[in-house]
Image (cartoon, helix red, strand yellow):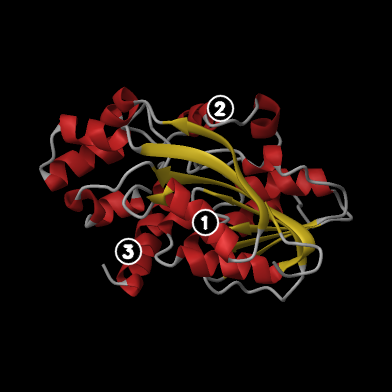
Amino acid sequence: MKKEEVKKNVRERYAKKVKSESSCCAPQTSCCGSVNVAEQLSKRVGYSDSELASVPEGANLGLGCGNPTALASLKEGETVLDLGAGAGFDCFLAANKVGKSGRVIGVDMTPEMLDKARENARKDNYENVEFRLGEIENLPAADDSVDVIISNCVINLSPDKPKVFHEAFRVLRPGGRMMVSDIVLTKELPDFIRSSIEAYVGCVAGAMIREDYVQAIRDAGFGDVKIVSEASFPAEVMANDPTVKEMIKDLNASVEQLRDVANSVLSVKVQGTKPAGGCC
C-alpha cells in the first residue's frame, strides 16, 4: 500500500468511527460501540474509574491500547503534546494533571475527530487544551516547544514511523520525555494480513516488530529508551472482536490463522527522553 493510500483510508475509517463511536484497536466484547463498551475497554487497558469519570462525556471512544498518561509523570505547568488525539480523551486526562498553568495540544489528521474533541473541550470548559489539524509525520508545533509527548495506539497507523519519532524529538524541549502506548509484533505478519486495509485500520497490519520499533526511537535521537510494560491480546478475545470477524470475512481467513496472528501482537508502553544537550 502506498503511504497516501494508507493515510486516506485511515482518515476515512476514523471519520466513520467518530460518528458511530465504535472501537478500533482495543478488543471489543460487544458488537455495539456504546459508552459502556468504551469504558470496559478502557478499564482493560489501564484506565481507572476516577479517570473515566473525570473527562467529558463522548471523549472516550474506546480506541486506545494503554494509558500513556498513567506513566508519563505529568507535572503542574507542563506542556503536553498528544499524537493522534482523537476525541480528546488522553488530552483531557493530561489537562487535569498539568493544571491551569499547563497546556495540552492534541494533534489529529481527521477533521471529524477534531470537531468532536473541540466540542468536548467547550462543553466542559477546558481552557488549557487546544486541538490542531495535522499529521504526526509533520507536527504543527515549533522546535523545542513541549515538555512531554504522549500517544495511544496511533503511531502504528503511520506509514512512516521513523519520521514520527524524528518529529517528536524535534518538538520536545531538551530533557523532555515521550511515553507512548502502541501495538507491536513479535514476528512478521502473513501477507494476507499485511496487505489488508481493514487490518491496517484495525491497528495490526501497520505494526512494527518490537525490537525495530524501539530501535527507531533510538535512531531518532532519544535516550533511556525502554519498554516499560507489555501485554499480549488473548487470542479468544481477538477471535470474538467484530473488527477481527470482519477481517476473517473479508480476507477469507480462518480463526486458526487469526489466532496465530493474535499470538504475535503485543500492546506496549515505551518511553524515551530527549538528552538535555538536545542531541544524542
Query: What residue is drawn where x is 36% and y is 55%?
Result: 206
Report the residue at 19% width, 53% height from top.
191
Q: Name the residue under label 3.
A: 9
Q: Check the picture and name the quadrant holding the C terminus.
A: bottom right
Disc marking residue 215? 1
Quarter of the figure with residue 118: bottom right
User: Mark 1 and mark 2 in contact (Cβ < 8 Å)?
Assistant: no
Circles 3 and 1, Cβ within 8 Å, touching? The answer is: no
Q: Where is residue 68 in the image (x, y as percent from the top left)?
A: 63, 43
Q: Nearer the viewer, residue 265 or 197?
A: 265
Q: In this view, does 90 lie above or below 167?
A: above
Q: Nearer the viewer, residue 258 or 188?
A: 188
Relative to 160, is 211 above or below?
Answer: above
Mark nearest the camera among 2 and 1 is 1
- C-alpha separation, residue under disc 2 versus residue under disc 3: 28 Å
Residue at 77 percent across and 42 percent down: it is: 73
Q: Which amino acid does label 1 sit on?
A: Gln
Check the image and report above or below for 270 versus 168: above
Which tag is nearer the camera, tag 3 or tag 1?
1
Secondary structure type for disc 2: helix
Q: Earlier in the sequence, mark 2 or mark 1?
A: 2
Q: What residue type is labelled 3?
A: Asn
Amino acid type, label 2: Lys
- Mark drawn on residue 14: none
Neighbour tally class for label 2: few under 14, some 14-19, many 20 plus, Cα within 10 Å: some
